[in-house]
Amino acid sequence: MLVAARESPRSIRACRRQDLPAVASLYEAAMRSGRRAPPPGLAEYFERTFFDCPWADPDLPCLVYEDRGGIIGFIGSHVRRMRLDGRPIRLVCGGQLVADPQARGPVGAMLFRAHLKGPQDGTFTDGANEAARRMWEVSGGEARHLKTMTWTRVLEPARFAADYALRRLGRASLARRLERLWKPLDVAALRLARRRFALPARTTASEALTPRAILENLREVMQLVRLHPDYDEPFLEWLFREMAAARSRGRLALSLVRGRSGEVLGWYAYYLDGPVASVMQATAKRGAAGEVLDELLHHARDAGAAAVCGRLEPQLAEALAARRCTYGWSGAGLLHSASPAVAAVLYSSQCALGLMDGESWMVHHRESFA
């Protein structure tokens, strides 16, 4: 399926470890600096995230497009093991689709079609641009409307607004230097609009989140959904290690939430980058979504966040609305499945597939790798 006729000099095949220097060179030229010489750590990063992930699967490989012995196209494949109504299935998060700008023919489109035709039960992405969205729709995929909504909870309105405006003007360093100036304004805003900006009283506590804690509580926390990650300890250890190493995303917080009696209510993960905490996952057991969110908001505020944002997960929608969050639209979440049964669940509120389970935390396009 992946290899063209033998006499053709052009073919699509599985990516091998020895291809990664060429893949890194192509990616650097097309998606990063425009130069053909990638930083020394880029090929190593691709090796860690594509080949050294415990869930890497030779049946669901990354693909390269080869022309006369040279690699002119690449598409990544991040395998994610899931449980659907208790049975194991495999999803693939597609990422890092890149083609040589000087290549002849629709290299990217052909790689993308070959990628979708793999034996996976479904394919998804969290970071689609307009070009990827068009290819996805032509190939039968759809936007995940329930999971392209975003939410923001403002904690310090003056600091958040000033930082946003200055960063838009390219003055991020000035925004950091002026942070203290906004404190009196935020104190006044809290007094004048306490109902809008004050947080509910804290009734929970958080502690460091470990792979073992997730595995011990996964069944109870995920009992309300039909489709959820089939985590194991090797994968979670790899995931936490790689997420912590993604320093250009900010400072990583991984926390387990306990209630008044010490019972586990759920967990969350976020990156704090400047004044904004970006949530990668927030998961709660039945009836505890509000308490987990409150703990998350308190933790982020104490860490220095002026606002907390994340993707709208259906299981959290009611609790988020009660906490006066504002909503937006990203349009970046796309899905494809040849199975109508799998597709129906993927598009529904019965799917627990967070940003932590995709590629949103990855840094292939933003880290220096020097």
Image (tube, rainbow, N blue to C red):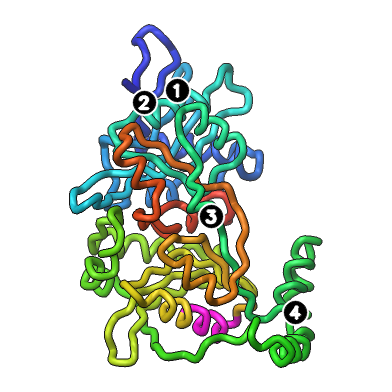
Q: Secondary structure at mark 3?
A: loop
Q: Which residue is mark 3?
A: 369
Q: Percent position (x, y) of residue 81?
A: 27, 50
Which numbered disc covers residue 158?
4
Disc 2 versus disc 1: distance between alpha carbons?
A: 8 Å
Q: Residue furthest left?
A: 87
Looking at the magenta stretch, what is its main secondary structure? helix
Q: Residue 181's x, y, as percent?
A: 79, 85
- Residue at the spot of label 2: 13
Please state which amino acid type lies under the numbered disc 3. Phe
Disc 2 packing (10 Å; few <14; some 14–19; many ≥20)? some
Q: Are marks 2 and 1 in contact (CB under 8 Å)?
A: yes
Q: Which residue is mark 1?
A: 66
Q: Quadrant of residue 225?
A: bottom left
Does the stretch in magenta take in 299? Answer: yes
**Res 288 → quadrant:** bottom left
Q: Nearer the viewer, mark 4 or mark 3?
A: 4
Nearer-N-terminus badge (4/3)? 4
- The answer to whether 306 appears left or right of 123 in the picture is right
Please, is residue 255 above or below residue 241 in the view?
Answer: below
The local secondary structure at tag 4 comes to helix
Q: CA distance from mark 4 to mark 1?
A: 52 Å
